[in-house]
Image (cartoon, rainbow, N blue to C red):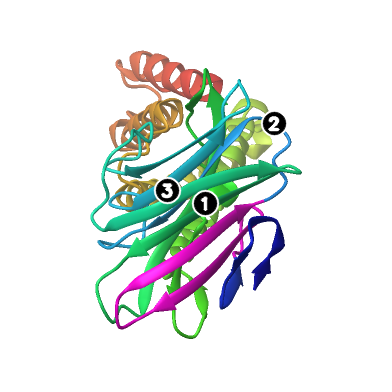
Amino acid sequence: MDMAKSNKVFSACNDLPYLDSFLHWTYDPSSGTAQIAFRHTGIASPRWVAWAINPEGKGMVGSQALVAFQKSDGTMSVYTSPVTSYRTQLQKGDLSFGVSDLSATYSNNEIVIFATLELPKNTTTVNQVWQDGPVLNDSPGTHDLSGANVQSMATLNLLSGQSATTGTTNSKIRSKYIHGVLNTISWGIMMPLGVVIARYVSVFESADPAWFYLHVTCQTSAYIVGVVGWTTGLLLGKKSPGIQHTAHRTIGILLFSLATLQVLSLRLRPKKDHRYRLYWNIYHRSVGYTRSSS
């Protein structure tokens, strides 16, 4: 692969599946030396780009990154950065392997990072991660935590050139879809339907007691589906250490707590002529209205 503008020639290249990125390399397994060029195209606004190898796993934490961006004065900033957490700001630091000939260019909305890596001898497969994000005050800002930015990781065979996205990433995406669908069905459809039945159908005498059983069925089914959705959310949290969606989590805890109180109220429901029925009605409706407005 000939990169004419840089006068560099590489023996292999790979189109990375996300973020308009490409990797070119020449690898000598006997010495563990890999000459690489990471290209990120389509940069229309100030952005940083990074390419990394993770010797410890298949995610961002533990990855050894090469970072580059164009500063406000037009010069390029390029450096190495060990990533220790999801909240890191890509600080400069030494990597767990040697790096030399590190440089970067920016031209025609494209940043290219060049480097020579000193990997352990006879390394064949590496876990690679690549990323981009905004540049704020000549420093890397936080990248997006959704879409392509959380899918940009893959294994790479340095000898064959074969690349494959990680099973963990695909599993996380699948779990997100399941989590979203289940919670939409539970809190967005079945719970409101149960409220509508109790509010507007119960006024008809001919609908008694059918409306009550429909109401209970909708609310109980919604709660069961919601429990499964809640569980998938907890599993997603375990798969994404360091990532916290505080507002989403708070709303989820509030909804789940109120729904649990409502389900428990079914067990505590006194008969219509019981002296505590008035207080139960106040409790049940107050929790229901609060949940509906959340």
- Secondary structure predominantly adopted by residues drawn in magenta: strand
Q: Reading the chain from its start, which is encountered first: label 2 or label 3?
A: 2
Tell me whether the residue at label 2 lies in contact with that at label 1, contact meaning CB atoms closer than 8 angstroms: no
Pick the front one: 111 or 285: 111
Q: Is residue 29 above or below residue 56?
A: below
Q: Is residue 13 above or below residue 81?
A: below
* Residue 217 visible in the shown view: no
The residues bearing labels 2 and 3 have C-alpha atoms spaced at a distance of: 20 Å
Pointer 2: what residue? 45
Q: Helix or strand or loop: what does disc 3 sit on?
A: strand
The residue lying at 55 percent from left, 36 percent from top is 69
- Residue placed at 36% from the left, 31% from the top? 253
> Would residue 86 be found to the left or right of residue 42 on screen?
left
Check disc 3 and report the residue beneath it. Answer: 66
Q: Quadrant of residue 34?
A: bottom left
170 vs 100, left or right, is right
Q: Amino acid at mark 1?
A: Leu
The residue type indicated by label 2 comes to Ser
What residue is drawn where x is 41% and y is 23%?
284
Range covered by the magenta-colored residues: 16-40
**3 or 1: tag closer to the N-terminus:** 3
Judging by the rendered image, the residue that carries numbered circle 1 is 182
Q: Position of residue 33 (x, y in %)?
A: 35, 71
Callout 1 environment at 10 Å: few (<14), some (14 to 19), or many (20+)?
many
